[in-house]
Amino acid sequence: MRAFTEARAATTPDELWWVEHPPVFTLGVAGKVEHLLAPGAIPVVRADRGGQVTYHGPGQLVVYCLLDVRRLGLTVRALVTTLERAVIELLAAHEIVAHARPDAPGVYVGDAKIAALGLRVRQGRAYHGLSLNVDLDLEPFARINPCGYPGLRVTQLRDLGVELTPATAAEALLPLLGRQWGYTRFDNVAGLP
């Protein structure tokens, strides 16, 4: 992501990459190790994104948003809002009422977080992105203070009665994200650069 972002020109198209990660805890640039309560054998990786600590693992959709935010005319706050809106729209399509919180970026169903955000913007270009809990083992979230909030509950689509895989969730979410930024045409390319 960093190499792509550093090498892009003013005309480089924006890209969305989606992946599933093996089990890993990531700490953002301001991440405090005291939010890692009991990582056990799960690796901890420092990431050059905003935010505190989160967990990524199989069954979670991670979308990396490689965007020229200047070209899109977005502030960082506006970018966060578009990410949250797209996830809220996806959940609404499954009759799930979700909301964003101004004091804690991400998407929530009731008081439980279903999607986390962590971005990096350098020279008007964003990378990193969001994670959506689809169908995964949530136990590792009990080993951390998710996003730096002690006792923050997390949830996932499966527990809300939505049977999707990360791939089918990506198929639905990526166009919603693109439309937030005014895109009407999308090309799918397999494999990351």
Image (cartoon, helix red, strand yellow):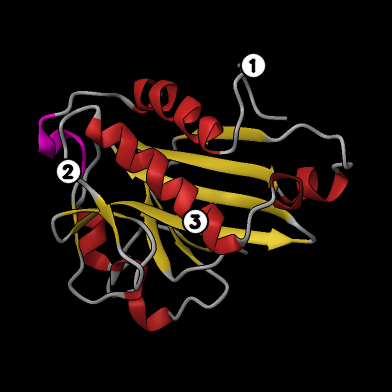
* Chain part drawn in magenta: 156-161
Q: Residue 33: which quarter of the image?
A: bottom left
Identify which residue, 189 or 109, lies in the foreground: 109
- How packed mark 1 is, by other alpha carbons closer than 10 Å (few <14, some 14-19, many 20 or more), is few
Q: Which mark is residue 80?
A: 3
Mark 3 closeness class: few <14, some 14–19, many ≥20 residues within 10 Å: some
Residue 97 image label: 2
Residue 159 colored in magenta in the image: yes
| Front residue of this view, candidates 182 and 67 | 182
Any part of residue 160 in sight: yes
Say which of marks 1 and 3 sits in front.
Answer: 3
Residue at numbered disc 1: 187
Q: In the rendered view, would you say 159 is above or below 141?
A: above
Q: Nearer the viewer, residue 41 or 22?
A: 22
Residues under labels 3 and 2: Cα distance? 19 Å
At x 36% / y 20%, what residue is drawn?
Answer: 168
Q: Position of residue 136 (x, y in %)?
A: 25, 39
Asked which secondary structure carries label 1, the reply is: loop
Q: Earlier in the sequence, mark 3 or mark 2?
A: 3
Residue type marked 2: Val
Q: Where residue 46 appears, x then y in whole percent? A: 56, 66
Image quarter hosting the C terminus: top right
Left-right relation of 174 to 115 = right
Amino acid, disc 1:
Asp
Give percent across and percent down for residue 125.
Answer: 73, 53
Residue at horizontal 80 percent and vertical 61 percent from the top: 123
CB atoms of marks 2 and 1 within 8 Å:
no
Q: CA distance from mark 1 to mark 3?
A: 23 Å
At label 2, counting other C-alpha atoms closer than 10 Å, the crowd grade (few under 14, some 14-19, many 20 or more) is few
Distance between the Cα atoms at labels 2 and 1?
A: 30 Å
The kind of secondary structure element at disc 3 is helix
The three-letter code of the residue at mark 3 reads Val
